Image: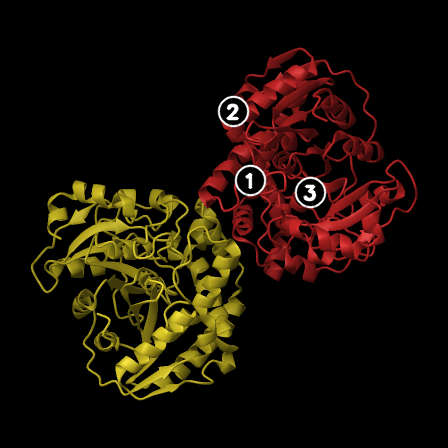
Chain colours: A yellow, B red
Amino acid sequence: MVEPLMNPEKFFEEATPVEAFVPHGRVVRSPRKTGPLSGLSIAVKDLFDWAGVPTGAGNPAWLDSHPVPSADAAVLSALLDSGAALVGKSVTDELAYSILGENFHYGTPRNTAAPGRVPGGSSSGSAAAVAASLVDAALGTDTGGSVRVPAAYCGLFGLRTTHGLVARSGLVPLAPSFDTVGWMARTIAPVSSLAAVLLPAADLAWSKVWTLPETEALVDTETRQGVGTVVRSLGLPSAGLVGLTEAYGGLEGLRKLYATLQGWEAWQTHGGWITERKPIFGPAIAQRFLTASLVTDEEADAAREQMLRFRVDLRSVLGKTGVLVLPASAGPAPLIGETEEKVAEIRSRTMRLTCAAGLAALPQITVPLRGSDGLPRGVGLLGPAASDQALITLALRTGVA
Amino acid sequence: MVEPLMNPEKFFEEATPVEAFVPHGRVVRSPRKTGPLSGLSIAVKDLFDWAGVPTGAGNPAWLDSHPVPSADAAVLSALLDSGAALVGKSVTDELAYSILGENFHYGTPRNTAAPGRVPGGSSSGSAAAVAASLVDAALGTDTGGSVRVPAAYCGLFGLRTTHGLVARSGLVPLAPSFDTVGWMARTIAPVSSLAAVLLPAADLAWSKVWTLPETEALVDTETRQGVGTVVRSLGLPSAGLVGLTEAYGGLEGLRKLYATLQGWEAWQTHGGWITERKPIFGPAIAQRFLTASLVTDEEADAAREQMLRFRVDLRSVLGKTGVLVLPASAGPAPLIGETEEKVAEIRSRTMRLTCAAGLAALPQITVPLRGSDGLPRGVGLLGPAASDQALITLALRTGVA
């Protein structure tokens, strides 16, 4: 991946069919030093500040109403100092408030791993660029599943880091209690390399694998089987976890908790700008912000209390060396042009699967699997706080990489 | 159409494939008296109160949170007293805030006149039921085009009445300055019969036909030709109207004016309920209400002032005996499953065509035409205040009926 840096124009010209990069983000940056990431090319979700390049956050009104950043986001700086090259700003769902990967303004990045299907979002362009082998890895963000889901849909490894471990300065926020930096790659090696630079070491001996039997009804057969395959491949004592979600109304109750808190925070974060600037949002994003604007402080307070209890519950189960294996998505990526009703239903099932990591502020890695129909699916490994690097090592045991 | 009244169950069973009626509206009402409408069966948009039957307004939360009305809407009462039978409550877009005809909760009524295409909205089920010959006519409402557009898409005559002429008691409002009652039929006769019952007489001798050359760029070839055909068929002196919209930023400026005022009124009307009840809206409707919630009083005041000026301008041009012939829609009905971007673009062009009647509070009738591709299109006749019945007579001259 040195060549594109030699001729960015040619690179982006050839990358055009993948539609992974925003028009204002056809830029590259050479590494500042040699280091552990030398030779790696990394696409950057257009939610991170890149000095001298506009940050679009997936919405043209955002692009227009914010100054071009003069400094790099902390993560970009760290990557450049470690030898990585940055290649392009990738399409994100509007303000990262979706897991579908269709952007009303910038289009739908091509999922080359599952043609005719969405790439997943909100780190849609990042996933698409990696899946199409345009770059070695890509930076994304994961608030409610925005790295884990596109990774599952595009057949990639994707890490959502422990909340708070990776600096978020220079990153457009959505819901700060849940916003995390993450990254994706086709094999585990680049995921591991970035982790070594951006995350603290995590030496731990995994002792126990948990599964969540209640997720089985939410996913397709291939995903369910994939979870079983991954559990067996880990070679650790395993058990089904029953009753974890009971006090919260099951996974649907947790999903609602999450949606309430995320919505409240999203409106706290962006409501002022939306009210002032009146941006045009695609219908699904507008729907989400309307709902967000209606969450009361009381509802958010009640949800937060529940969230903190759930956080303690899940962390107690995992201890320091337990891992929860669960579906990363409900099935393969939805078809492009699926009905709104079906998309809403898939989204709802998916969020029931992804919300635990967000609510508990824990790391989760997507391990990609391919179903017998040839379509990518993903299994998640959810670990204790700061176990990120150990999760990556554990993912190696699945043999997929 | 006496038979279905004999066996409503069988009627609604057989009507099922058209998906025009809401589940809670599979009801019929016999006429109270014989009269000028005897023998006519009329479907009722589920926005009108029908004593003893829930009013759904296209949204399940609305259905759940409002008592079953104990009285009929004024219009229903008048129809029953004039001999009409009421047959079924028809699907409406949510709170009538769309012209597309896809309802997130109740589905998309089948456009049998253009299979694979939307029926148009918000009087979607009414148009679908009439197009499929399930009923002789159907009641709808037209705020921004909700009768005129589905009529054009489904190959029907559709009348938007002069604002304020037909009683709106027992009707769920959207934007009271623009809300009107309207109706549709396959031929002009039932449109005329209902008009005779619901509207004052209008004896006038049409003197002049106006066209709006600036609409030509907004429509497809067949619609453009249709306007010409209709103008010629009227056999009156005609002229192109230039400069009408100049002071308002053209038709796009008028569309924006309309959207601002409609949005402001829609939020005044429903914002309280939405905030309190937090209904689930389909994405496109939520998008509209989010935008509506952001309109400031100052913006609405400024727009209202402009609207009143435009109203005077257009009414001055028409005088008492002039008619404006313009496209009723931008082209045939959009395909089901069209992209959001394309739907938004079509909507925007359509609203530039429909907003004049709303802003000027004037009546407009859609005359259906079929293009060489076999798809329905519509041409609108827009007349002076209270000229509704004369517009119907004028529509007869086009020879379509």
Pointer 2 residue? B221
Picture quarter containing residue B7? bottom right
Chain ID at mark 2: B
Circle nearer the N terminus (3, 2): 3
Q: Are marks 3 and 2 in contact (CB under 8 Å)?
A: no
Q: Which amino acid type is shown beneath numbered disc 2?
A: Thr
Q: Residues within 10 Å of mark 3 (few under 14, many from 20)?
A: some
Chain ID at mark 1: B
Circle nearer the N terminus (1, 2): 2
Residue B72 appears in the rendering: no
Pointer 1 residue? B298
Pointer 3 residue? B132
In this view, B184 is above or below A36: above
B136 or B286: nearer the viewer: B136
In this view, B1 is above or below B358: below
Q: Residue at x 79, y 18 (%)?
A: B204
Q: Are marks 1 and 2 in contact (CB under 8 Å)?
A: no
